[in-house]
Amino acid sequence: MSEITAESVPEFPILRTCPFSVPETYRELEGTGGRIHRVRMSDGRPAWLVTKHDDARAVLSDARFSSEKLRPGFPELSPGGLKALTYFSPFLVNMDGPEHAQARRAVLGEFSVRRINAMRPRIRRIVDAAIDRMLEQPGRPVDLAAHLSQPVPTLVLSAFLGVPAEDLDAIERNTGKMLHEARTEDEQRAAAEALHAHLDLVIAAKEENPGDDFLSRQIDRSRREHGDAADRFELASLVQLLQIAGHASSAAMISLSVLTLLSEPEQLKQLTADPSRTPAAAEELLRFLSITDTGPLRLALEDVEIGGVRIRAGDGVLIPTLPANRDAGAFPDPDRFDIGRLPGTRHVAFGYGAHQCLGQNLVRAELQVVLDRLFHRIPDLRLATAPEALPYKYFGQFFGPVELPVTW
Ligand code: HEM
């Protein structure tokens, strides 16, 4: 057993630069033999880093580790970063226990396999229209990130939520202002107020003109729970959460998936020869790419022993999905990309336990349709820039390329 102290240890987040490789720091930590490692957050506070697949699942399914990000001591990726949460109603990712379970039950049916599968024809039309526009571009190369990865998740979310795509774009821009551009607390509060004012208009418009969509049904639910008037603050928080959780993540995943398959011609050949392999290929892409490699994060509520280490109540615990999904104990030859790897769903790309990604069926449907349609319609698609020469960044918590020039 060991005590957590802020000594000379790696700083978290441990960011990657290569889309396909686990950062060297993780391999060095592994070399030390321990299962759980001390790291320090950017504010200097110490925290525990979990890198093994078994330990990640143990922490993520243990109610003694809290997701309530406003609890004192919750690990922060950047100093002051959690302040923005105070402007919204805590929703799902920031809740624990029965309160979380109840909030999740209220929306779970919307994300069921049945409901999402019913959206597949619409997703296919959205993807095909985006590919049409790519093909219509007068010159080459064409930026696939701008023409496919960005617009497809916006239009799919728009269809799912029942919120116009232009509003979703504006919500994303204003969220960016609040989270990344505001320099003072006043500026941050002003950005949050502008965001709420816009979301209020979006909800009011939907109250006037309900449809067969997520937001209309959530307005009905809220009215039933709160009497006649829906709780617009809570609904605004929900729409904003789904936009920030659902857009940049899916966009990064589409770009990186296309990049990976175009860099692995043998695997791509196997996939296009047998489209029934698409679901397994999508799972392997989720595992191999693990785009949420700066989280999930938790706070220990009690003393708990994990991987031979006693984690104390009040300690921060970090469970990045990338090292857990590249753990040789769970996935033989883990750094090899292999669409034939089974069973695909053991990965923790969507987290695990009570907070496991609510949007995972939507992501799967979207990714599978993109892979099927793109390589079928543009069989000689190829990269116009080598993967190592592309610019990458973290879109919030999600890693991906800024642009992806392709040609055919
Ligand atoms: C490739 C795309 C995506 C990845 C890799 C991803 C990953 C994750 C992960 C790792 C978590 C767990 C967080 C935690 O345990 O603290 C999570 C939670 C969540 N995700 Fe996703 N996500 C993706 C797309 C989406 C989409 C498209 C939506 C919705 C439209 C969505 C909605 C959510 C929500 C609401 C939660 C919180 C669930 C809860 O706390 O109960 N995600 N996601």
Image (cartoon, rainbow, N blue to C red):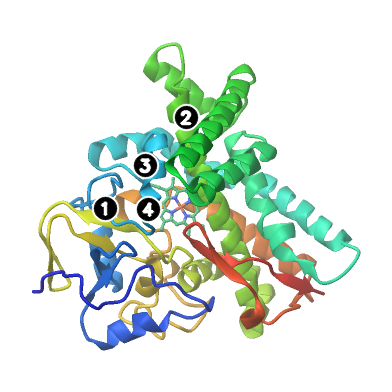
Q: Residue furthest top?
A: 228
Residue at numbered disc 4: 356
Residue at numbered disc 2: 235
Q: Is mark 4 within 8 Å of ligand 1?
A: yes
Instruction: Give the alpha-carbon distance from disc 1 to disc 2, as whole Å.
Output: 25 Å
Q: Are marks 1 and 2 in contact (CB under 8 Å)?
A: no
Identify the image quadrant of the C terminus.
bottom right
Q: Is residue 45 left or right of residue 216?
A: left
- Asked if residue 300 can be seen in this view, the reply is yes
- Asked if residue 277 can be seen in this view, the reply is no
Instruction: Give the alpha-carbon distance from disc 3 to disc 1, as whole Å.
Output: 16 Å
Q: Compared with residue 12, is residue 173 higher up or lower down, i.e. above or below?
A: above
Question: Which of the labelled discs sits on residue 74, or is there none?
Answer: 1
Q: Point out the tag, 4 or 1, that comes first from the N-terminus.
A: 1
What is the x, y in percent for residue 128? 76, 54
SS category of the residue bearing label 2: helix
